[in-house]
Image: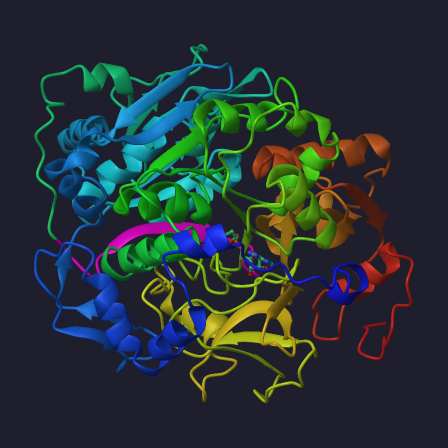
């Protein structure tokens, strides 16, 4: 990202109207209070939720880094997201407005959603689903995805949503790691006017990881798909049986019981299943949603992410529903059939808050402002951005063309690991385009060098979080050592969390995120690991070794560049390079498709055998390769 000072120095102050309706009028005093009495702050926030039993202790920090929040408390996030709303007027309010890509529309009131979730929870129980077991959900963006997630949580099962854009190996690996017995999927979904098959991919994945005993398929596209006797069931068949009745008790879980796992990419090939809980996660997503998006009962909120990523979990499903908000969900591509699709929906449904990614904004910006200008976007009052740093040009376009200079942009920095927003503006915080601004309540950050000394103002360093927060991931499923090693080992003395991003802080205390310091690659805001791409390449018979790196790209933030060493006797060429790209796409998914495949005889490695990706990057960019003294002969 370019230096902020080069493009836009302007500070955007909140308007009178924004200040007037803001849930928090003044950030600083509440922030000071929240960090000097962290536990009191979070206890107060937790009291907004309904607990079956109140906690004994807000925070137990005795077993660092395995923190426990609201210890002794009994709660279920679904009780807070659905059940308790049945007792008041929220019952009649829309929970979900959903539009399919072909233009079909479905809506669910809180009453209807509660009913569908209860019915599907009974279906899951009839299939033997038990509290504590992991149920995998591999779906397009349809309401049944949300229903399935909530149904799992309602009965105390743990959901593991695998993004519908992932493919065979990515899905198989996640099913296997979680030892999942039940899979919920769909025949497919619509994307750019075409039916994209999911069940066929699920079938191939189930062959590779045979733990699945029951697979429930939602009919969405109506395509032909193979169904296996005794294993495969149609969702609509099960939901039409008497067992799918709308009466289903919500299980009383412990505050620290796992709610879901979500896999994310790290440095090694194996994705990490981060564990989030019923109690702390509910409190954290509810509070961040309420303060950052300044939610009001009359609002219609649209998070244009996929439920398969943490953004979808926290700000399509749990944050909005706990707050009794109305959320919009859309199935397909932003520019289908024309680049005005989103703006048309904002006008049609009267959306007030739009939360999306810099990539999506850059993608729509390409088509020019006239597509947005054809629509009345006056319902919008707040905008949001997430996933990668937003470049000032895209920020300005979003602010002016979409927000008409009236809507503050909440550039929210967070991670799958953090559960919710960590550095983020509130509507009343003056904005600097490209900066995520300040820490959310309760959080203290710092920019430090490798030894943990704070770097000078304006200098780049490692971003660390100095305190525990309720939404933090508790561990990596089945691998607590890796959890310690990845996030807590580097600054173990100080007990700081290593975020994996480099950043700087300016003279006003504003944070500017620069990018990842590890082998995580962000393509269009999606998180991939170089090792994942490398193992997909090596699984092809022609390849013996591979290295993947990120190269900067104007539209997608980054693109994937790969270098491969071929097996002896295999001939390099354009045909093979296309075949390898398609292979990665088939194994991991379209987002992982390399933009470049370069053939080489040997990869640059250190004497200890580590691939020097830095050298590959410099070469690919035609830059000086720097110090090569550690390079192996
Ligand atoms: C990484 C986490 C959090 C939901 C989606 C991403 C990058 C995220 C921002 C932002 C600059 C950002 C970081 C972070 N990132 N938001 N507002 N500004 N960078 O979750 O897939 O776990 O990725 O996304 O590099 O570490 P994720």
Residue 333 is at least partly visible in this image: no
**Quadrant (top left, top right, bottom left, bottom right) of the C terminus:** bottom right
| Residue plotted at (27% across, 55% down) | 282
Above or below, comparing residue 129 to residue 630 in the picture? above
Magenta stretch?
253-273
**Quadrant (top left, top right, bottom left, bottom right) of the N terminus:** bottom right
Across and down, in percent, residue 587 comes to 58, 37
Taking 612 as reference, is 227 left or right?
A: left
Above or below, comparing residue 447 to residue 364 in the picture? below
Quadrant of ligand 1 in image: bottom right
Task: Name the image quarter holding residue 37.
Answer: bottom left
| Residue plotted at (41% across, 57% down) | 420
Across and down, in percent, residue 43 comes to 22, 69
Residue 568 is at least partly visible in this image: yes
| Residue plotted at (88% across, 68% down) | 625
Task: Name the image quarter holding residue 585.
Answer: top right
Q: Is residue 596 shown in magenta?
A: no
Taking 493 as reference, is 357 left or right?
A: right
Q: How is the image coloured?
A: rainbow
Taking 507 as reference, is 617 left or right?
A: right
Across and down, in percent, residue 468 comes to 36, 74
Across and down, in percent, residue 164 comes to 48, 33
Which of these two is toward me, 622 or 55? 55
Q: Is residue 272 shown in magenta?
A: yes
| Residue plotted at (24% across, 55% down) | 278
Which of these two is toward me, 177 or 325? 325
Which of these two is toward me, 489 or 252? 252
């Amino acid at each position: 990202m370019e230096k902020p000072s080069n493009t836009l120095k302007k500070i955007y102050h909140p308007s009178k109207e924004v200040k007037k309706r803001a849930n928090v009028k003044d950030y600083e005093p509440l922030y000071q209070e929240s960090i000097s009495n962290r536990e009191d702050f979070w206890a107060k926030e937790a009291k907004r939720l309904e607990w079956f039993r109140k906690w004994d202790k807000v925070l137990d920090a005795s077993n660092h880094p395995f923190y426990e929040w609201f210890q002794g408390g009994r709660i279920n996030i679904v009780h807070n997201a659905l059940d308790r709303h049945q007792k008041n007027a929220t019952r009649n309010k829309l929970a979900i407005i959903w539009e399919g890509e072909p233009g079909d529309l479905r809506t669910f009131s809180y009453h209807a959603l509660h009913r569908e979730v209860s019915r599907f929870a009974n279906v899951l129980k009839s299939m033997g689903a038990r509290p504590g077991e992991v149920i995998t959900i591999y779906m397009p963006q349809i309401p049944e995805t949300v229903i399935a997630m909530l149904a799992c949580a309602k009965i105390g099962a743990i959901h593991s949503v695998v993004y519908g854009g992932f493919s065979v190996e990515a899905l198989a690996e996640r099913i296997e790691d979680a030892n999942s017995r039940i899979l919920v999927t769909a025949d497919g979904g619509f994307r750019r006017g075409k039916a994209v098959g999911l069940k066929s991919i699920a079938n191939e994945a189930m062959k590779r990881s045979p733990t699945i005993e029951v697979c429930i398929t939602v009919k969405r596209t109506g395509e032909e798909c193979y169904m296996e006797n005794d294993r495969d069931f149609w969702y609509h068949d099960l939901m039409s049986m008497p067992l799918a009745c709308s009466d289903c008790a919500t299980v009383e879980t412990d505050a620290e019981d796992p709610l879901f796992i979500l896999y994310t990419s790290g440095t090694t090939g194996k994705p990490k299943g981060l564990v989030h809980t019923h109690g702390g996660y509910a409190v954290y997503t509810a509070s961040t949603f309420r303060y950052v998006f300044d939610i009001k009962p009359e609002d219609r909120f649209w998070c244009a992410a996929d439920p398969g990523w943490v953004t979808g979990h926290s700000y399509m499903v749990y944050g909005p529903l706990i707050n009794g908000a109305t959320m919009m969900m859309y199935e397909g591509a932003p520019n289908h059939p024309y680049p005005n699709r989103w703006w048309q929906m904002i006008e049609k449904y009267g959306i007030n808050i739009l939360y999306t990614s810099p990539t999506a904004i850059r993608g729509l910006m390409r088509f020019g402002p006239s597509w947005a200008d054809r629509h009345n976007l006056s319902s919008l009052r707040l905008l949001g951005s997430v996933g990668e740093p937003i470049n000032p040009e895209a920020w300005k376009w979003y602010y002016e063309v979409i927000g008409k200079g009236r809507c503050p942009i909440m550039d929210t920095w967070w991670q799958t690991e953090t559960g919710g927003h960590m550095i983020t503006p509130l509507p009343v915080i003056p904005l600097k385009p490209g900066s995520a601004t300040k820490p959310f309540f309760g959080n203290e950050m710092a920019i430090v060098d490798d030894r943990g000394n704070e770097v000078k103002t304006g200098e780049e360093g490692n971003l660390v979080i100095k305190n525990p927060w309720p939404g933090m991931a508790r561990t990596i499923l089945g691998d607590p050592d890796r959890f310690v090693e990845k996030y807590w080992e580097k600054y173990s003395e100080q007990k700081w969390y290593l975020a994996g991003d480099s950043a700087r802080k300016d003279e006003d205390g504003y944070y500017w995120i620069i990018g990842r310091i590890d082998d995580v690659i962000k393509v269009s805001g999606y998180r991939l690991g170089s090792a994942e791409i490398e193992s997909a390449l090596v699984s092809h018979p022609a390849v013996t070794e591979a290295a993947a790196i990120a190269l900067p790209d104007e539209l997608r933030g980054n693109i994937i560049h790969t270098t491969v060493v071929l097996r002896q006797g295999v001939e390099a060429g354009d045909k093979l390079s296309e075949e390898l790209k398609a292979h990665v796409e088939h194994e991991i998914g379209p987002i992982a498709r390399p933009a470049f495949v370069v053939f080489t005889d040997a990869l640059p490695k250190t004497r200890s055998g580590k691939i020097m990706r830095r050298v590959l990057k410099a070469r690919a960019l035609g830059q000086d390769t720097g110090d090569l003294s550690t390079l192996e002969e």
